[in-house]
Image (cartoon, rainbow, N blue to C red):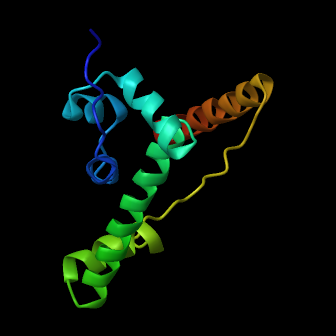
Amino acid sequence: MARPKKEINWDKVDKALMAGANGVQVSAMLGIHFNTLSKKCEEAHKCGFSEYMETKREKGNNLLHSKQFELAIDGDKAMLIWLGKQRLNQSDKKEVHQTVKQEERTLSEVQEELKRLEALKQSENEQFDDD
């Protein structure tokens, strides 16, 4: 004797997906195997479960964005600050980026500079010895 067919409450599935649940979590919530959920999705919605899940998740994301925007517009300072940082690239502090141009010198140029500095030091030492 076959198991009785389980009816899927798609409103419940939609709410779980909009809240961010994945297919395995939804199938566990319904008490069915994920493969069964996938097959039922194909039958009921004429698309794969991944596509269906993505559509519902994006709907949930849109609802969250709308609510956050609404809170910010209504004067929630924390939400205004957060949305400003996320969407408008605002920050609490300004970062200053400075580039330093570095001279590229050959080994022989560096050796010549070293000789010049040693000669200068030697002449300074001789000058102090004379005093």
- Tell me how many marks there are: 0
Going by the picture, which residue comes out furthest to the front? Answer: 1
Q: Which residue extends farthest top?
A: 1
* Closer to the camera in the image, 14 or 116: 14
* Closer to us: 129 or 37: 37
Image quarter where the N terminus lies is top left
Name the spot of residue 15 as percent of width and height, x first.
Answer: 28, 54
Residue 64 in sight from this viewpoint: yes
Tell me which residue sits at (71%, 43%) in the image: 103
**One can see residue 93 in this view:** no
Q: Position of residue 61 (x, y in %)?
A: 39, 60
Residue found at the very far bottom of the displayed protein: 74
Question: Relative to 123, is 28 on the left or the right?
Answer: left
Looking at the image, which residue is at 46% across and 74% down? 88
User: Which residue is at a point 29% across and 75% down the rendered structure image?
Assistant: 67
Residue 60 location, x and y as percent?
Answer: 36, 59
Identified at 41% across, 73% down, the residue is 90
Vertical relation: 86 (above or below) 40: below
39 in relation to 103, above or below: above
In-image side of 89 versus 63 (left or right) = right
Q: Is residue 32 above or below residue 53?
A: above
Q: Nearer the viewer, residue 5 or 104?
A: 5
Q: Residue 66's image quarter?
A: bottom left
Left of 19 or right of it: where is 115? right
Residue 5 locus on image (x, y percent): 30, 27
Taking 75 as reference, is 42 left or right?
right
